């Protein structure tokens, strides 16, 4: 359901503009306007801090431990969870005009505009406000989180006195004969901020933790300060530093004080109408589980020194250069739908922010835009986010997989606890420990292990990085292949079965032979065997011999993929098509999402699907299904998929495009892309839907572009709905840059950088030499039999 109040975002190609302040939509805009580089995340709160819905300053993987309570415990249940915490807030800049606090809830707000500039990588704000005493000021601020200096953020904050209010220069609250206005800026670092209460009835939400930071050090300088804290239970140390440059009229005074949880730099100046006071605030953040207090302190002081050396203009220029290079490859152009164009660029921007400088840390499901899902990472990272990053920011994708390798020891321990061989990666985690307290939708979702292996294979094919394959991929592949060989078994007919697991669809738990899981495991086993045979010495050091490789190939060849010959479709899992269908016609619209309104036992035994599962299997493994099976499967599952997960629409868009339902594919693409700009799920205040953002890229490239990346090269099968006049996208492939442009008449392929190459267009070879574009006809869409969604669950209407 869409909320009653939506922010008014203008539709523009490269910015997200909020031309007026909407307090009812503040939680949503705080998420949309969040800035991050994968290490630091600054939620899009107002500079003065209030009013707010959720204050948020996050450091990737900086968390606190909390207990996981159970009504009834069981063997192998995780005993504790991990929750990302709101660390020291450096965004705050409070303003007093004479003795009146700048607070939008008081006085008169004449103008308020915020603009997220996706080319500059900045959040800009302009406000005209009149105090209760009649002083009118104009406030301009620009905020950034640096993509080039990982530990750095910065804010430019300027206050101009527009008028004294009464027209009399000497009038106003300053008293008779006192000209201008006395401006006081208080720039702060605040630890252990008070957080609002959250809705505990929704299991998707995080657990709020208060006062988790123990003060260790506070130091103040002339125009800045540093605070160092340590978490109480996880024992992680965090440093935050600020420094200021001040520009204003003569007589400006600057002072700084600091205590355990608060550091404040105060800037005071008297300004005349037309004059302004400007402060540039530099911030630096760092944390460690190992480094000493002096080391962390010195780390953030060094980062802030580097920021000051670069200067505000230098940081802004570096940011623009970085993004110019990024967009030259990553930009997706869509002609014929301006609203979708903006949304797809916002999605791409947030994916970059989530992973650009994560550098061997996880990519959380909400990025660093809020603390939804406790800040955990899931399978979303490998299946959706890395699908994008491997082709537009490959080093970020490689680092995410290096992080998975770094937590292998914990995955080995988890597998041993479960009585299995190899590695059992956690369903949800920050540091690498399993943090899911609900095992049917956690531990039993073993497919996450094959999702990681799939990401390794895709990344190696996309980059051609055989060194990465050997140094990172091999160990991940061996560990996950061993899990599948241990988890599955051969039945009396010789089939290799994987029973009692949960696939991507969390409304169908603990099932036998989930098709998605079995196909993913099959690929995992085959690819592990291939890579181990390719690198025999390194594989031998992991204890792999020819007999084990043969056992992986044997299991893969015998993998059981159920098929319902009566209906002519693949059951999502064995026996699924024999279950009773959910009564969609008698399910009120306000009872969605179903998991919040119906018991799981009822969902588990009915034909109702939360998110694309079998349909996702067809996206990843098109060769495992005939064209007729794809069409029949898509129609069958379209009728029972309710999309209670934001992960679904993008996958349905891909397969709608591949089965000829091009307008439906356009609608699903829009739903995936607009999930946060229009708050379609009603929970954007808890953070951006990063995987759905990533899925918009997949819907364009894999759906309308028909892209496939294999060891033998790239292939495309482009199509275009009649509602769009052109789609253009770029990607990196094995050291090259390629741009593809699709129109109703023809598709153009252009090699913009790198060595000559060959690709396939609808199966036909095309050579690219960099001298000019190559073109081929775009097929004319053919009519296909329409498909139906469950009652009341058609793609969401925009507006």
Image: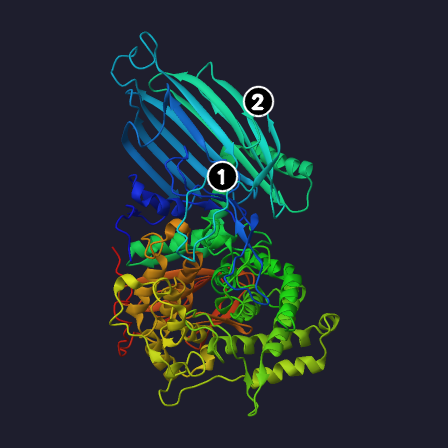
**Number of on-image labels:** 2
> For mark 2, does the 10 Å Cα neighbourhood hold few (<14), some (14 to 19), or many (20 or more) residues?
few
Q: Which residue is mark 2?
A: 222
Nearer to the camera, 185 or 537: 185
**Residue 442 horizontal/vertical position (percent):** 51, 66
**Residue 164 horizontal/vertical position (percent):** 30, 17
Q: Is residue 149 visible?
A: yes
Place residue 25 in its image quadrant: top left
Q: Quadrant of the C terminus?
A: bottom left
Q: Residue furthest top?
A: 177
What whole-number distance in Å separates the C-alpha atoms at marks 2 and 1? 28 Å
The residue at the point 53 percent across, 38 percent down is 88
Q: Which residue is mark 1?
A: 317
Residue 166 vertical position relative to residue 343 in the rendered view, above or below: above
**Residue 780 horizontal/vertical position (percent):** 30, 74
The secondary element bearing badge 2 is classed as loop
The secondary element bearing badge 1 is classed as helix
């Amino acid at each position: 359901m869409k909320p009653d109040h939506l922010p008014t975002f203008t539709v523009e190609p490269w910015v997200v503009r909020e031309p007026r302040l909407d307090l009812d939509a503040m939680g949503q805009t705080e998420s949309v306007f969040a800035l991050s580089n994968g290490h630091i995340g600054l939620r899009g709160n107002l500079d003065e801090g209030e009013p707010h819905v959720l204050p948020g300053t996050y450091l990737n993987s900086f968390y606190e431990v909390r207990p996981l309570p159970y009504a009834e415990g069981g063997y192998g249940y995780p005993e504790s969870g991990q929750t990302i915490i709101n660390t020291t807030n450096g965004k705050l800049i409070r303003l007093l005009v004479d003795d009146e606090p700048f607070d939008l809830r008081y006085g008169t707000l004449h103008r308020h505009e915020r603009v997220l500039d996706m080319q500059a990588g900045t959040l800009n704000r302009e406000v005209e406000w009149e105090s209760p005493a009649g002083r009118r000021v104009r406030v301009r601020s620009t905020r950034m989180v640096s993509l080039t200096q990982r530990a750095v953020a910065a804010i430019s904050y300027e206050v101009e006195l527009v008028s004294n209010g009464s027209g009399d220069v000497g009038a106003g609250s300053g008293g008779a004969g006192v000209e201008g206005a006395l401006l006081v800026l208080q720039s702060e670092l605040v630890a252990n901020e008070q957080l609002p209460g959250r809705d505990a009835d929704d299991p998707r939400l995080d657990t709020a933790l208060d006062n988790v930071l123990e003060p260790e050090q506070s130091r103040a300088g002339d125009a800045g300060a540093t605070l160092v804290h340590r978490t109480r239970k996880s024992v992680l140390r965090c440093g935050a530093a600020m420094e200021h440059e001040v520009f204003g009229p003569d007589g400006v005074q600057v002072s700084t004080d600091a205590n355990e949880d608060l550091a404040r730099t105060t800037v005071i100046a008297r300004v005349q109408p037309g004059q302004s006071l400007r402060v540039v605030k530099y911030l630096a953040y760092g944390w460690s589980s190992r480094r000493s207090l002096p080391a962390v302190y010195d780390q953030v002081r060094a980062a802030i020194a580097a920021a000051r050396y670069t200067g505000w203009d230098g940081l802004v220029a570096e940011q623009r250069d970085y993004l110019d290079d990024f967009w030259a490859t990553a930009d997706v152009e869509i002609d014929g739908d301006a609203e979708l164009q903006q949304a797809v660029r916002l999605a791409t921007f947030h994916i970059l922010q989530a992973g650009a400088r994560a550098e061997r840390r996880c990519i959380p499901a909400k990025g660093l835009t809020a603390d939804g899902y406790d800040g955990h990472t899931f399978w979303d990272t490998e299946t959706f986010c890395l699908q994008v990053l491997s082709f537009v920011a490959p080093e970020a994708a490689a680092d995410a997989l290096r992080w998975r390798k770094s937590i292998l020891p914990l995955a080995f321990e988890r597998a041993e606890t479960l009585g299995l061989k190899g590695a059992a990666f956690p369903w949800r985690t920050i540091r690498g420990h399993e943090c899911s307290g609900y095992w049917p939708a956690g531990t039993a979702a073993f497919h996450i292990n094959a999702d990681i292996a799939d990401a390794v294979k895709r990344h190696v094919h996309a980059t051609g990085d055989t060194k990465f394959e050997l140094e990172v991929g091999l160990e991940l592949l061996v560990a996950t292949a061993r899990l599948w060989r241990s988890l599955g078994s051969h039945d009396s007919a010789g089939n290799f079965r994987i029973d009692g697991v949960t696939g991507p669809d969390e409304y169908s738990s603990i099932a036998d032979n989930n098709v998605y899981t079995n196909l993913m495991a099959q690929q995992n086993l085959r690819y592990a065997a291939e890579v181990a045979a390719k690198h025999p010495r390194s594989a031998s050091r992991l204890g792999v011999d020819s007999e084990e490789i043969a056992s992986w190939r044997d299991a893969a060849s015998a993998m059981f993929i159920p098929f319902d010959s009566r209906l002519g479709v693949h059951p999502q899992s064995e026996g699924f098509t024999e279950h009773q269908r959910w009564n969609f016609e008698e399910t009120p619209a306000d009872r969605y999402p179903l998991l919040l309104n119906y018991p799981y036992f009822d969902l588990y035994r009915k034909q109702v699907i939360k998110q694309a599962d079998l349909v996702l299997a067809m996206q990843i493994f098109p060769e495992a299904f005939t064209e007729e099976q794809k069409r029949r499967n898509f129609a069958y599952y379209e009728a029972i998929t309710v999309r209670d997960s934001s992960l679904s629409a993008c996958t349905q868009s891909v397969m709608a495009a591949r089965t000829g339902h091009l307008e439906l594919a356009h609608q699903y693409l829009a739903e995936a892309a607009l999930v946060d700009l229009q708050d379609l799920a009603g929970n954007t205040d808890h953070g951006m839907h990063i995987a759905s953002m990533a899925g918009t890229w997949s819907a364009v490239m894999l759906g309308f572009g028909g892209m496939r990346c294999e060891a033998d090269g790239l292939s495309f099968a482009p199509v275009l709905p009649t509602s769009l006049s052109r789609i253009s996208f770029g990607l990196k492939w094995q050291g090259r840059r390629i741009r593809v442009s699709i129109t109703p008449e023809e598709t153009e392929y252009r090699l913009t950088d790198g060595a000559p190459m060959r690709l396939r267009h609808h199966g036909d070879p095309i050579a690219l030499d960099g001298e000019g574009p190559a073109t081929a006809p775009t097929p004319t869409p053919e009519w296909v039999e329409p498909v139906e969604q469950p009652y009341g669950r058609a793609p969401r209407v925009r507006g």
